[in-house]
Image (cartoon, rainbow, N blue to C red):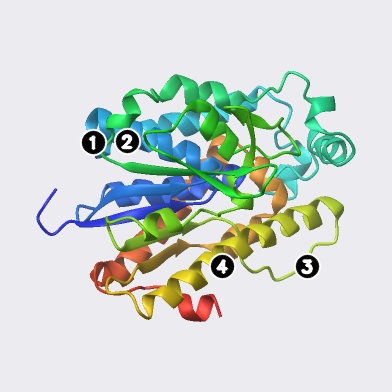
Amino acid sequence: MGNASKPIALALQGGGSHSAFAWGAVDRLLTEEAVHIEAISAVSGGAMMAAVLAQGMMEGGRETARKQLETFWRKVSLAMSLFPLRMNLADKFLGHAGIDLSPSSMALDYITRIFSPYQFNLFDINPLRGIVEEMVDFEALQKSPVALYIGATHARTGKAEIFSREQLSLDAVMASSCLPFVFKTVEIDGEPYWDGSFSGCPPLFPLAESKGTPDIVLVQVNSAYVEEVPTSAADILDRANEISFHSVLLHELKTIALQNKTAARPVHVHRIEAQDMLASLGRASKLNADWNFLTYLRDLGAQAAEDWLKASRDKLGRESSLDISALAA
């Protein structure tokens, strides 16, 4: 790490398979000697990646972290291939990136709207839990050089709960990614938690209030804007969730913008995104864990990070490259 290397704090969203976009962005940042990742705030799929990344950094630095992230996504793709949620010939013929015409996808949409996971997922099966458990030593993770802030939502109060690196556990990561339509509520010390995206997507305040880097790099996966208003029940529900998640993010950005007006040490906010491309893929593609699709998203994320670095690398430590006042207006 050279003397010119600038610290950044990552803010990682989740979004099912679309989280592989964040994988690509992070992978590119890990190859960039001009920056180093000092802290990560994350929710949902981003929380799993954050834990794997921090484990890799602790074990062997950047290259180990890159290898561990690829291993994680390979395991995700393999695990999901054992389930019936995959593209069928009709989807491929019609050029769908998702699994729009998969009978199992249609069945899942129907089941999750009629039944709760306490009825259709009695054993609370989540293949991702085993992958995270295998790859992350949470006790050892306390020594990681990367600070972690993993967000979950308290199911009773709706308030954000932040699990720091020292508090982090497998249950905390799974709570952060617990969509209550699919998985049973995760209990930690007798308290119930749902997906962190409901209360912070991802939470920015732990990064803004820390005494570390003033530069927050948001890797945005969820679409803030869509060209067409959805008309199917499943797509409407997905868009409603996106709007809910984004409104929380906008509130935090507005707060940072207001505080920056009087702060002696303003927070600089940056964003890596490809929202037009991700929105065009459709809701069903968030369930597509085909390896070719995941690597397509990885490459898209890597290119987005490359474009951001070229345009904004010199602004790090000096100013925001994202106009948060206009965005939060």
Return the x and y of residue 26 as percentages of the image width and height.
Answer: 38, 48
At numbered mark 4, what does the secondary structure look like: helix, strand or loop?
helix
Q: Which residue is mark 2?
A: 65
Q: Residue at coordinates 54% horizontally, 75% vertically from top-left?
A: 328
Nearer to me, 291 or 312 = 312
- Say which mark, if any, is on residue 251: 4
Task: Please state which of the two labelled residues, at mark 4 or mark 2, is closer to the viewer.
Answer: 4
Residue 324 lies, in percent from the top left, at 46, 75
Crowding near the residue tagged with mark 2, few <14, some 14–19, many ≥20 C-alpha atoms within 10 Å? many
Contact, mark 3 vs mark 1 (Cβ under 8 Å):
no
Where 202 sits versus 108, above or below? Answer: below
Name which residue type carries label 1: Gly
Amino acid type for the residue under numbered disc 4: His
Q: CA distance from mark 3 to mark 4?
A: 23 Å
Cβ atoms under marks 4 and 1 closer than 8 Å: no
Identify the secondary structure beneath mark 2.
Answer: helix
